[in-house]
Amino acid sequence: MVFKVYLPAGHGRIEKLVKPMLTQDLRCRSVIVQIGSTNFRSARKFMTDQLDEFVVRLIEISNPESSGARRLPPERELCAALNVSRGALREQLATLQSLGILRRRQGHGSYIDAPDASFLRTYFTVMRRLDYLSGEQFAGAREMLEETIAAEAAVHVTDDDIELLRALVDVMMVQSVAGNPEAALEADLAFHTRLYAIVDNPIFNMLDLGLSHVLHEDVRVRRDFAARHDAKKPDGSINTDSVHSEIVDALATRSPDRARAAMRKHFTEFSALTLIPLSGGQQ
């Protein structure tokens, strides 16, 4: 199996680095790398490190804006400061723009800013669709993340947060009983997103947004399964929904340990329902 990387003109340094170890198709200017080769990993790290250094240098020579973004100098000044040609500069800037790190405003210039989660969301969606990320791997990662989030949320949660979370659980249960799976799904997703918002850590927020599409599909499948197989209570509700109330009760105690345990139960009970051991048998 091979991996093909397309290199536009101007990558002379990279081609010189990888040429001794790779075969090249000059018609499409691609380099063909054997998957798993140490040389490929070294070349990829080289390219990533070069881009990281480029971004850091841009930030150093940019001007801060009140919004937190950094305004770049004109192209001529950038070329002089970085000692690069216009072609090489534009190529690197185009890469940053595709990642959402660089934004251009007509008549105002170019700005470096923190990217949104769109590139990460696309990454995880492609990984999942191509089966590079299995359902079990995603479920295990989600369990570890959300147990941590629940524990931290217990430290920061407010009475208003508790009220909102209880309302979301109520909507979830009422809509499930009424036979409105889409509305129940949205309440379920909103419940978990609210926990990330309570913690309000930029890294976790980025992961929450980045995983949102894959999470939406995963929770939909889980809820469809639960609707068919989870035992109905006298009021028509199912445990898959009501277990969220226990998470809220634990959060209301402001105990990280109780919140973590309640979130773990949220996963273990679904695992028992499906009889599929996930994440070491915990989800």
Image (spheres, rainbow, N blue to C red):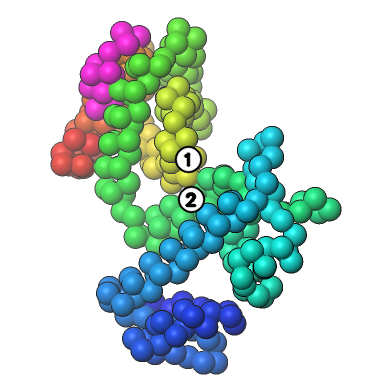
Quarter holding the C terminus is top left
Q: Residue furthest right?
A: 107
Q: Quadrant of the N terminus?
A: bottom left
Outermost residue, left side: 281
Picture coordinates of residue 183, whole percent (x, y):
52, 28
Q: Residue at x 72, y 56 (%)?
A: 73
Q: Position of residue 114 (x, y in %)?
A: 57, 45
Q: Quadrant of residue 24?
A: bottom left
- Residue 115's spot in the image, x, y percent? 57, 47
Q: Pick whichever of labels 2 and 1 is earlier in the sequence.
A: 2
Of residues 169 and 49, the one drawn nearer to the viewer in this rendering: 49
Q: Is residue 249 magenta?
A: no
Element type where label 1 sits in the image: helix
Q: Position of residue 79 (x, y in %)?
A: 67, 68
Count residues near mark 1 (Cα–Cα under 10 Å), then give few for <14, some for 14-19, many for 20+.
Answer: some
Mark 2 residue crowding within 10 angstroms, few (<14) / some (14–19) / many (20+): some
Q: Are marks 2 and 1 in contact (CB under 8 Å)?
A: yes
| Residue at left offset 30%, top offset 29% | 148
Looking at this view, is 101 or 122 the one in front? 101
Can I make out residue 167 in this image?
Answer: no
Residue holding disc 2:
120
Which residue corresponds to mark 1? 206
The kind of residue tagged 1 is Met
The amino acid pointed to by label 2 is Leu
Which residue is located at x 24 percent, y 16 percent? Answer: 258
Q: Is residue 197 above or below residue 32?
A: above
Stretch in magenta: 252-264
Q: Is residue 183 above or below residue 139?
A: above
